[in-house]
Image: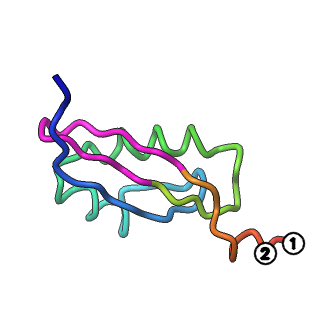
Amino acid sequence: MAKKVKAVIKLQIPAGKANPAPPVGPALGQHGINIMAFCKEYNERTSNQAGSIIPVEITVFEDRSFTFITKTPPATDLLKKA
């Protein structure tokens, strides 16, 4: 049986630099997510894209587990680097 979704959180975080400080900590803490587990996994997944802002969509489930999808950097971020 599929888990029930409690919330979907969308953030834009610099690649490899997620930490429990605002805006990440408060956004995740209010949904009961283990903030350090998210930060560690996000930083591992985005370490090869250092210097870019990476949008992430976090799906929070009723049992306080989560999954997340990283997306491509915004066009404005890519244009600044060109």
Q: Viewer-proximal residue, 5 or 20?
A: 5
Where's residue 76, x and y in %? 69, 77
In the image, is residue 59 part of the stretch drawn in magenta? yes
Residue carrying label 2? 79
| Amino acid on which the number 2 mark rests in the picture | Leu
Tell whether position 74 is magenta: no
Q: What stretch is highlighted in magenta?
A: 57-70
Tag 2–tag 1 contact (CB < 8 Å) = yes
Residue at point 52% right, 60% down?
55
The one nearer the camera, 33 or 7, is: 7
Q: Residues within 10 Å of mark 2 (few under 14, many from 20)?
A: few
Q: How crowded is mark 1: few (under 14 residues within 10 Å), some or many (20 or more)?
A: few
Q: Relative to residue 62, is residue 81 drawn left or right?
A: right
Residue at mark 1 = 82
Residue at the image point whose x is 59% and y is 50% from the top: 16
Q: What element carries label 2?
A: helix
